[in-house]
Image: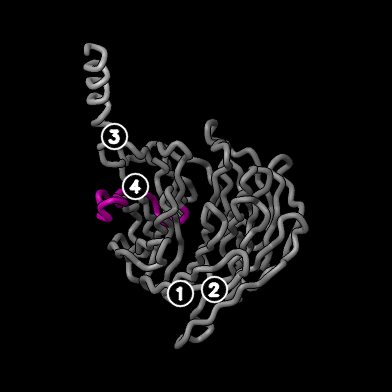
Amino acid sequence: MHRHMCLLAAAAAAMPFLIQPAWANMVYVSNEKDNTVTVVDSKTMEVVKTINVGQRPRGITISHDGKLIYVCASDDDTVEIIDAATNEIVGSLPSGPDPELFVLSPDGKTLYVANEDDNLVTAIDIEGKNVIAEIPVGVEPEGMGVSPDGKTIVNTSETTNMAHFIDTSTHEITDNVLVDSRPRFAEFKPDGSEVWVSAEIGGTVSVIDNNTREVKHKITFEVQGLRSEQIQPVGIRIAADGKKAYVALGPANRVAVINTQTYEVEKYILVGQRVWQLAFLPDGKTIISTNGLSNDITFIDTATDEPIKSVTVGQLPWGVAVSPN
């Protein structure tokens, strides 16, 4: 009897852990016009904090442990560091002029930044807070992608209309791939086999084979009732299982859902005005869009590909990042 009572007591002690509600992931949205980052609770889908940051915040990402948020303060020529626990700015990184977008290496040690004004990609050692390489690329670099193994980064140059493949061990360009007009974003498939590059003015997404470094397919878009020039692909995110891709279509006010095996558009999701960037919640069940001209973000259910709720944030929301825990 005594042994059974001990087991029951142990089970009862463990029970609160089992029935506690899951922690909500925090969603961080950079607002380009009012120089703020809005913090949204992903569970309640409500704003919990507004953080004042530097001028014209655009690219935003978060450390793999969720402790630090990095923000491109483009007009201040710096990357600001925010403590996720306090929502306070605790430092900065030397980004080079006009940082727009960046990507964090899989090991979390290096930040690769696109410097739009001086046609460089800057590699920053996060721990040392120093520049370890400046890599010349095409004119007006913007999009940044990193391979799952961390061996390759891809930068897109808006005016040169190229995707530049860069070896992270040598910081040298190994391949230049011509895509359509004004490429804005690069996203690797989770297995590293392909890189998807959006072309805002060209109106396409180029699927590049990562082995041959050649365009293997071009995805086009057609929305009933919209002129082709209104359909401007920008942000791209591919699901963790690699089966579906989501593409923000700018002034088309829609997110396209694409089958990554057939490259067919399966659905267009109506969200806010001028949809720009996208981010998944860690469980993959929700994706969030930033809608610049309607000053809101939209939570989308990835099982149904239907919008759940739109939440008002700051002025001209641009980037979005989600805490991993």
Residue 225 x %, y %: 45, 88
Residue 67 x %, y %: 40, 36
Residue at x 41% of width, y 74% of height: 253
Indicate yes or no whether the magenta region holds residue 184.
no
Circle 3 sits in a helix, a strand or a loop, which is it? Answer: helix
Comparing labels 4 and 1, the label whose residue is closer to the camera = 1
Circle 2 sits in a helix, a strand or a loop, which is it? Answer: strand
Question: Taking 11 as reference, is 224 left or right?
Answer: right
Q: Is residue 198 above or below residue 143?
A: below
Look at the numbered discs 2 and 4 and tell me whether their residues touch, using CB distance below 8 Å.
no
Q: Amino acid at mark 4?
A: Met
Dot 4 or dot 1: first in sequence order is: 4
Mark number, residue 268: 1
Look at the numbered discs 1 and 2 and tell me whether their residues touch, using CB distance below 8 Å.
yes
- Does the image show residue 99? no
Indicate yes or no whether the magenta region holds residue 57.
yes
Q: Gap between marks 3 and 2, in whole Å?
A: 41 Å
In the picture, the quarter occupied by the N terminus is top left
Q: Gap between marks 2 and 4, in whole Å?
A: 30 Å
Magenta stretch: give its range. 40-59
Comparing labels 4 and 3, the label whose residue is closer to the camera = 3
Q: Label 3, on which residue?
A: 18
Q: Gap between marks 4 and 3, in whole Å?
A: 22 Å
Q: Label 4, on which residue?
A: 26
Q: Amino acid at mark 3?
A: Leu
Comparing labels 1 and 3, the label whose residue is closer to the camera = 3
Q: Observer-nearest residue: 46 or 91? A: 46
Dot 2 or dot 4: first in sequence order is: 4
Mark number, residue 285: none
